[in-house]
Amino acid sequence: MSSLDKQIDFTENSCKNFIDFLASSAPIPGGGGASALVGAIGVALGNMVGSLTVGKKRYADVEENIIRCKKEADEITKRLLELVAKDAEVFEPLSKAYSLPKSTPEELAKKEEVMAVVLKDACEVPLEIMKTCARGLDLMKEFAEKGSRIALSDAGVGATLLKSALQGASLNIYINTKSMKDRVLAQQLNDETDSLRKTYEKKADEIFENVCNEIR
């Protein structure tokens, strides 16, 4: 079984397997896959808050909204788990591209052509991880504000995990845009990444502080 097969198999297997693969010298999984998994765990915590809210008389007035949030949380969690494997799929070609020969002008031109493609691909997955975590943070705000108060701390934990996942994915973009020859594309990707960070790091911090203020 290849390292990629093992990575994909993880989402249907155990946490220990993923941690063991992550700690090994294998090129995958890495920070991108780990970020996607952390994001999925964060969203799942929000979904748990929703599960503890639905069916309770005290929260009858928000039940319809919480059910909607839970459905979207299911979709986000599923996508983030898919992105664990997708990150590995795009990293392997990048890893191989770095090893291409460049002894002649022809080899160098070919390597630069390949690198342009794989670097762009390697940015698209962490960017999607960031956007998906951003959706998760929008939901987490609703879970924290409207969900069961007995699980409020879990919404706070979910927000911190989603923030970490978003930041982790951003680093995978920055390290790849730094190597791009196309500096216009690199700047566009960096700008989009910066914008997501600015908006959603702030949102995550606000959720965390609001939770702290209520439970302390």
Image (cartoon, helix red, strand yellow):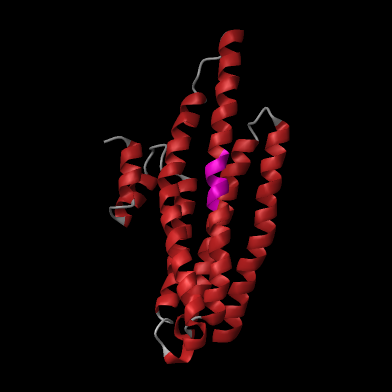
103 or 45, nearer to the observer: 45
Outermost residue on the bottom side: it is 58
Classified by dominant secondary structure, the portion drawn in magenta counts as helix
Residue at 68 percent across and 48 percent down: it is 192
Q: How far across and down, in percent of the image, does residue 56 sit?
A: 41, 88
Residue at 59 percent across and 73 percent down: it is 208
Q: Is residue 171 above or below residue 116?
A: below
Left or right: 21 as drawn, with respect to 80: left
Q: How far across and down, in percent of the image, does residue 96 sit?
A: 46, 26
Outermost residue on the front side: it is 64
175 or 36, nearer to the observer: 36
Q: Quadrant of residue 3?
A: top left
Q: How many marks?
A: 0
Residue 168 in sight here: no
Q: Does residue 127 show up magenta in the picture?
A: yes
Q: How far across and down, in percent of the image, does residue 186 sit?
A: 68, 37
Q: Is residue 71 above or below residue 193?
A: below
Residue 179 in sight here: yes
For the record, the magenta segment spans 123-129
Q: Quadrant of residue 80?
A: bottom left
Q: Quadrant of residue 209?
A: bottom right
Quarter containing the N terminus: top left
9 or 209, nearer to the observer: 9
Q: Is residue 134 above or below residue 8?
A: below
Quarter containing the C terminus: bottom right
Residue at 50 percent across and 30 percent down: it is 94
Q: Is residue 112 above or below residue 124?
A: above
Q: Does residue 27 show up magenta in the picture?
A: no
Q: How far across and down, in percent of the image, does residue 34 sit?
A: 45, 51
Residue at 56 percent across and 44 percent down: it is 172
